[in-house]
Image: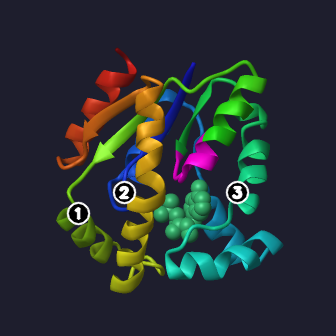
Amino acid sequence: MKRLIFLGPPGAGKGTQAQILSDTYQIPHISTGDILREAVKEQTPLGQKAQSYMDQGELVPDDLILDLIKERLSQSDTAQGWILDGFPRNVSQASFLEKLLAELDLAADCALNLEVPDEVLVERLLARKRKDDNEETIRRRLEIYYKDTVPVINFYRERNTLKPVNGNASMEEVTASLKAIIEH
Ligand code: AMP
């Protein structure tokens, strides 16, 4: 059973690594960003509400995200575990997740924090060419990351579940570091 949380700034490689580990361990990769992008593409009510926040690099309000995660984590493919990528993004989401899991008699195994210096992030994000990856939104996403998401690192550190990982290495090296921690 593997219940893994991926933390790290935008551009740290969370999505890539989460997908690799999802294939390796055969557990779902749950990316709130991917779910939201799909909703925007389909122009569902969720997508319509989320779009302007995403285009500006702001966080989508919690009330749009919390039900979505609760519903996703209750689906049957999560029985063997999951990898969360892009959630929790702030301390209130982290508290919500902790309570939700406690109700299910579960807890996350660890929060893997991919550490990458800012200069490298901006370079990587500009190379990625996603719709919300222009210089202004990148700057805004990094600001939001420091303000709202860095406190989540402390949340898991206090619970002794934080595992720092050097994300400033080749994809293969980062995967190897992650596996070493997970399989420890
Ligand atoms: P990501 O793919 O994780 O970089 O997410 C892309 C965008 O989706 C973010 O810039 C936010 O606008 C939104 N988003 C994704 N996950 C969350 C979340 N857990 N809480 C709030 N907004 C989110």
Real-space CA distance between mark 1 and mark 2, rounded to the nearest whole angstrom: 9 Å
> On screen, 112 above or below 89?
above
Q: Mark 3 points at which residue?
A: 65
Q: Residue at x 49, y 28 (%)?
A: 25
Where is residue 106? Give x, y as percent.
67, 21
Q: Mark 1 points at which residue?
A: 118
The question of residue 90 being in magenta is answered with: yes
The residue at label 3 has a CB less than 8 Å from ligand 1: yes
Q: What residue type is labelled 1?
A: Asp
> On screen, 79 above or below 126?
above
Q: Which residue is drawn at 65% across and 79% down?
A: 51
Q: Name the residue under label 2.
A: 9
Left/right of residue 144 with respect to residue 73 in the rendered view = left
Give yes or no for contact between labels 1 and 2 (Cβ–Cβ under 8 Å): yes
Q: Does dot 2 land on a helix, a strand or a loop?
A: loop
> What span is in magenta?
85-94
